[in-house]
Image: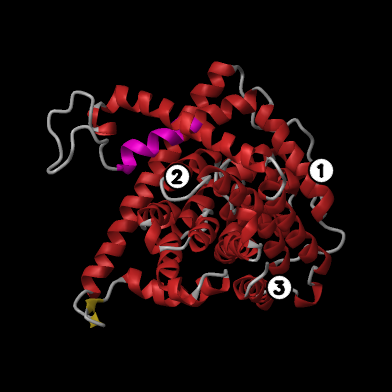
Amino acid sequence: MFSLLNLQSLFGLVVIVFACWAISEDRKAFPWRLTLGAIGVQALLVLALFAIPGSQVVLAAITGAVDGLSVATAQGAKFVFGFLVDGKQDAPYYLTNADPKVTAPFTFAFNVLPMILVISALSALLWHWKILKWITHGFGFLFQKTMGLGGASALAVAANIFLGMIESPIVIRAYLDKLTRSEIFLMMVVGLATVAGSTMVAYAAILSPVLTNAAGHVLVASIVSAPAGVLLARIIIPEKPGQGGAVADYNTALKYDSAIDAISKGTADGLMVVMNISAVLIVFVALVALVNIMIGGIVIMDAPLTLERMLGWIFMPVAWLTGVEWSETGRAGWLLGVKLTLTEFVAFIDLGKVPAAEMSERTRMIMTYALCGFANIGSVGITVSGLSVLMPERREEVLGLIWKALFAGFLSTLMTAAIVGAMPAIIFG
């Protein structure tokens, strides 16, 4: 049932934990119980969501819900953008050599960004109706009891599974000034290790043509990466005895006056997310292209040198540690490099473009988990600017922690990928 690839993933887990211990601010305070507990929670969550009889029905339902959201969003997008969404509605022309009956090629601006607006508004509405709020509190209670987190930290960690890395601190805004340095770092790491609900659906839509139950995998990835972020954050900056544990009640700072207010503010928040994503993608893709122009004159192995090729080489052993076969580590390492520099959106788009025949199902699944997190260079600026607004008096503290948080957040998704890689293949059959 287990193979050498499973053992390879387990070895990767050890290396990831060791890497965080190596830069720990207190190596003597290694959290052994938390380490075993976090890995156990991750493994149990994956088993519960994929191995329990009937779980495939749940995953199919999630996929169906995502498909329904995609269809509904397309209707709203077509009302504004017309034929640009699907190439059919009153199109003044057709693409060269394209069949008029076939939908238009995937366009990020028209096929992904509108979905973020819809999901952001829907999330706010579900929060106002207390549905998402109680689900979040449920996960917060779980993390508080199983991982020893303070109430405020546990609630922030749980909120990160469904909300954005800036929205989740708003949930515990009244407690931000009471958090210890270790708790602030933990909140930053988990924010970078997970993704927002608004982007989850977009990732699933991108991967659905090439990955079965893509929506279920993306949801599980965000949930399972939360305990990983908690663990690695606690290893790097352990909580000092007698500190932390701020208690949070259910009266959070994130409130709406009515359903219409929730939809309006959720849409406005989604618009800010869309603008941030668009701006970051434009700038970072342009910067990478600029670097490629400057180094393009260097030819290695009969091909011009590019930043993507360099990152692929650098991250090959990293991809191998998650359980990817060595023959596929070149492309997998390249995807990890793209995620770190060009955001996970570009990496997911590139993963979705890889034909099914050119990447094994195991590698594609592992990379889905490894890429599913906000840990990229662009998110550094978003995190610093967002937290500086919420707690301006601790801006210097945030600046001093951000690069360590990026390191831990990036490794958290790799840890989740390694957990999945260590599982028997029959679970995902």
User: Magenta span has 110?
Assistant: yes
Tell me which residue sits at (50%, 63%) in the image.
363
> Distance of mark 3 from mark 1, alpha carbons?
25 Å
> Distance of mark 3 from mark 2, alpha carbons?
42 Å
Q: Of the residues shown, which amino acid type is indicated by label 3?
A: Glu
SS at circle 3: loop
- Sequence-wise, the earlier of marks 3 and 2 is 3
- Can the viewer see residue 36? yes
Residue 379 pos. (x, y %)? 48, 54
Q: Residues within 10 Å of mark 1 (few under 14, many from 20)?
A: some
The residue lying toward the viewer, choosing from 385 and 217, is 217
Q: Of the residues shown, which amino acid type is indicated by label 2?
A: Ser
Task: Please name the residue that numbered disc 1 is placed on.
Answer: 247
* Residues rendered magenta in the picture: 106-119
From the viewer's perspective, is residue 285 above or below residue 6?
Answer: above
The residue lying toward the viewer, choosing from 137 and 184, is 137
State whether the magenta stretch is mostly helix, strand or loop.
Answer: helix
Q: Residues within 10 Å of mark 2 (few under 14, many from 20)?
A: some
- Sequence-wise, the earlier of marks 3 and 1 is 3
> Distance of mark 2 from mark 1, alpha carbons?
40 Å
Q: Residues within 10 Å of mark 3 (few under 14, many from 20)?
A: some
SS at circle 2: loop
Tell me which residue sits at (73%, 32%) in the image.
134
Residue 56 pos. (x, y %)? 62, 42
